[in-house]
């Protein structure tokens, strides 16, 4: 059997690859660095997008217990759990508090490891495959193809379907797929492919390509799995107890809950999302984390301001200048998400977000009080949704000025949108492609953890 350790680069439509290449090799970049260096950075980006970050980040509920206590409890819980893929010997649990972010714990991810592929193949959807690479087991709804006579206890090699071409219920698949590890079937094939959607774990991963913990059901009110840049957003917004905050695009509510926790649950956090069933998820998360200051509404945030209203309203729409701080964690092309082995979007889809983000931005500025803070963030790497939006906002709203961010652990903004060096320094771009080769091994662990994240962007504005 073949041994696999090398991963492919992210698979994109050629038109999207060319577009992104144009972004990373734009005129301003090429005037400041060599073509070779810019090309290398771009290739590195494509390569690291398909891998998971090298640390798992959990946000600790420091509004409920001290970081030290949560760390200790987490250690105890994870010791009980055999580290996914390791042998039965005592597992050393390494949990590292982030030195500058008081509610972050980091756990190293090991991989890619050399894992032998077996002859029994099971294929999962790309989303499920990415979750497996981040430490999850295979949940039954994610399974697309399995061996014909699979029964509980069978050992299978798990592959992720790269192009979304595998038919549900197939017994084999010859299309583009990538190996994500070996596991033990928990269900028979017949219970997976039924008329009713199956529930529960379909395959327990025992030899994943990337070894990390499964946080499913682990200390649910004390630890919350969240990408490091997303935790940074809450701190950059810096909400204070007693304030009224608007989170315009809130579901599933990771940042909403963080904001409420940072305020000690004192004040009001209004969470909007336009998709109704996602509102339930925000409420579930708030309940799980014992947060009472969150009010969630299903609403199109573009229409969340009404000039006709003179008095404060509890739900949307709101009169202008209703909020002390606004978070616009915008819907975006999501090209910074990791691991992402395949993206089947067309260029039109990738480029479709800028107009919506601008409409939301207009509403955000109107709803913000004078002297208030607006944070704009995305989990994508394009200029059009990041630095270009900042340049447009500064041009369109003379009342806005860029503010320094605390903490600022990512890189500065990228050249290409005509922003000055001072302006770029005020932006925070998490650029995983800048991580690996620029880290010498003597660098403290958090330097690598801070850079080897999902691709993300944060801008902070003050309304004067
Ligand atoms: N802030 C969230 C968190 O940290 O958990 C993630 C938000 S996600 C990047 C963007 C969200 O915006 C999606 O849940 C989507 O349903 C929502 N959305 C898209 N268009 C919207 C609109 N016009 N009004 C309100 N929400 C919208």
Image: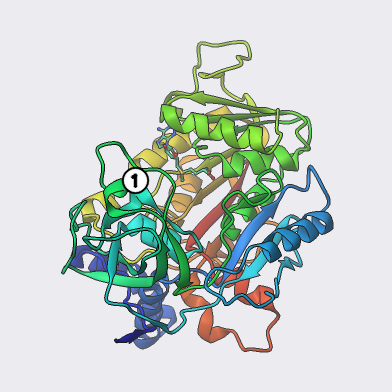
Point out residue 40 in the picture as x, y percentages from the top left corner.
38, 83
Ligand 1 lies under 8 Å from the Cβ of mark 1: no
Q: Is residue 21 visible?
A: no
Task: Find residue 375 and report its image quarter.
Answer: top right
Task: Find residue 171 and report its image quarter.
Answer: bottom left
At horizontal 41% and vertical 42% (from top left) the residue drawn is 357
Indicate whether 256 appears above or below 339.
Answer: above
Task: Find residue 70 and report its image quarter.
Answer: bottom right
Coloring scheme used: rainbow
Indicate whether 342 appears above or below 256.
Answer: below
At horizontal 27% and vertical 76% (from top left) the residue drawn is 119
Which of 194 and 12 lies nearest the eye of the viewer? 194
Q: Is residue 280 left or right of residue 126?
A: right
- Dividing the image into four quarters, tell me where ligand 1 lies: top left
Point out residue 232 in the picture as x, y percentages from the top left corner.
64, 55
Point out residue 256 in the picture as x, y percentages from the top left corner.
61, 39
Provide the secondary structure element on which disc 1 rests. Answer: loop
Q: Residue beneath label 1, please? A: 353
Point out residue 155 in the picture as x, y percentages from the top left corner.
37, 69
At horizontal 75% and vertical 33% (from top left) the residue drawn is 265
Which of 344 and 409 lies nearest the eye of the viewer? 344
The quadrant the N terminus occupies is bottom left
């Amino acid at each position: 059997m073949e041994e696999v350790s090398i991963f492919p680069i992210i698979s994109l439509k050629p038109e999207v690859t060319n577009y992104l290449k144009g972004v990373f090799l734009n005129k301003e970049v090429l005037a400041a660095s060599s073509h070779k260096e810019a090309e290398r950075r771009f290739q590195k980006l494509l390569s690291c997008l398909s891998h998971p970050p090298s640390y798992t980040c959990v946000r600790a509920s420091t509004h409920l217990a001290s970081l030290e206590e949560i760390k200790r409890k987490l250690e105890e819980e994870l010791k009980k759990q055999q580290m996914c893929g390791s042998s039965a010997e005592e597992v050393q649990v390494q949990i590292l508090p982030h030195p500058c972010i008081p509610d972050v714990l980091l756990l190293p991810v090991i991989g890619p490891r050399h894992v032998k592929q077996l002859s029994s193949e099971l294929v999962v959807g790309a989303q499920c495959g990415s979750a497996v690479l981040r430490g999850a087991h295979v949940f039954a709804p994610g399974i697309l193809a399995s061996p014909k006579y699979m029964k509980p206890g069978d050992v299978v090699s798990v592959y992720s379907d790269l192009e979304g071409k595998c038919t549900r219920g197939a017994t084999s698949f010859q299309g583009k797929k990538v190996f994500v590890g070996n596991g033990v079937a928990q269900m028979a094939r017949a219970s997976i492919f039924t008329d009713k959607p199956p529930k529960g774990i379909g395959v327990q991963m025992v030899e994943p390509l990337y070894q990390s913990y499964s946080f499913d059901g682990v200390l649910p009110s004390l630890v919350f799995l969240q990408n490091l840049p997303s935790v940074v957003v809450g701190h950059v917004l810096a909400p204070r107890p007693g304030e009224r905050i608007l989170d315009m695009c809130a579901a599933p509510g990771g940042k909403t809950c963080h904001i409420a926790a940072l305020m000690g649950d004192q004040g009001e956090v209004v969470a909007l999302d336009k998709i109704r069933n996602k509102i339930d998820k925000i409420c579930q998360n708030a309940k799980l984390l014992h947060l009472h200051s969150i009010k969630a509404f299903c609403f199109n945030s573009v229409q969340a301001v009404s000039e006709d209203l003179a008095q404060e309203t509890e739900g949307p729409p709101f009169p202008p200048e209703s909020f002390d701080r606004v978070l616009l964690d915008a819907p975006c092309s999501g090209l910074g998400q990791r691991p992402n082995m395949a993206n089947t979007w067309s260029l039109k889809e990738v480029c479709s977000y800028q107009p919506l983000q601008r409409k939301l931005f207009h509403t955000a500025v109107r709803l913000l009080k004078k002297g208030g803070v607006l944070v704009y963030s995305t989990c994508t790497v394009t200029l059009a949704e990041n630095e270009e939006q900042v340049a447009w906002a500064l041009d369109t709203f003379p009342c806005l000025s860029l503010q320094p961010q605390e903490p600022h652990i990512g890189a500065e903004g990228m050249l290409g949108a005509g922003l000055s060096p001072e302006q770029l320094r005020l932006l925070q771009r998490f650029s995983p492609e800048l991580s690996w080769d620029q880290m010498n091994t003597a660098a403290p662990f958090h330097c690598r953890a801070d850079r080897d994240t999902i691709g993300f962007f944060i801008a902070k504005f003050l309304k004067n």
